[in-house]
């Protein structure tokens, strides 16, 4: 029984276990009310300290990998709804917007 509990605990702490925000991509809609958001996000101004490096796509069909975001005007067509906060401690995760598509992805 002890070995099973140890196995379960180690499987959650393994390096392969990713944070859920590392898999966010696709169409994103920015909301004005944090209660309507799936995630509360802090925009970091340092690439090294952000959780995700985001490249803003101009076509939603190219936003097909983690860190590739297309901002959707209509919330009904968005995969995720986010709220940007200016307080890092309130955020689920932080993002840094890059100008280079190849830099996009989780910053682990």
Image (cartoon, grey):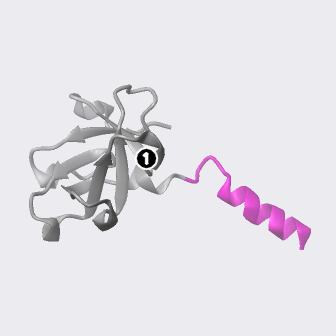
Q: Is residue 34 above or below residue 56?
A: below
Horizontal and vertical percent for residue 49? 46, 30
Horizontal and vertical percent for residue 54? 29, 39
**Furthest residue to the bottom?**
1
Residue position marked by numbered label 1 in the rendering: 93
Residue sitting nearer the eye, 39 or 18: 39
Residue 16 relative to residue 56: left or right: right
Q: Is residue 28 above or below residue 35?
A: above
Residue at 10% across / 64% down in the picture? 74
- Magenta-drawn stretch contains 7: yes
Residue 19 relative to residue 58: left or right: right
Query: In which quadrant will I find the N terminus?
Result: bottom right
Specify the quadrant of the image occupied by residue 48.
top left
Count of marks placed on residues: 1
- Magenta-drawn stretch contains 75: no
> What stretch of residues is rendered in magenta?
1-17
Residue 1 relative to residue 23: left or right: right
**Furthest residue to the right?**
2
Q: SS for tag 1? A: strand
């Amino acid at each position: 029984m002890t070995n099973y509990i140890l196995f379960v605990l180690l499987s959650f702490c393994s390096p392969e276990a990713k944070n859920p925000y590392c898999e966010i991509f696709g169409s994103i809609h920015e909301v004005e009310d944090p209660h309507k958001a799936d995630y509360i996000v802090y925009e970091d101004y340092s690439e090294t300290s952000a959780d995700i490096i985001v490249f803003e796509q101009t076509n939603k069909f190219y936003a097909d990998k983690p860190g590739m975001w297309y901002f959707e005007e209509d919330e009904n067509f968005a995969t995720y709804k986010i709220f940007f906060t200016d307080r890092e401690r309130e955020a689920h995760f932080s993002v840094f917007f890059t100008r280079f598509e190849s830099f996009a992805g989780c910053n682990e």
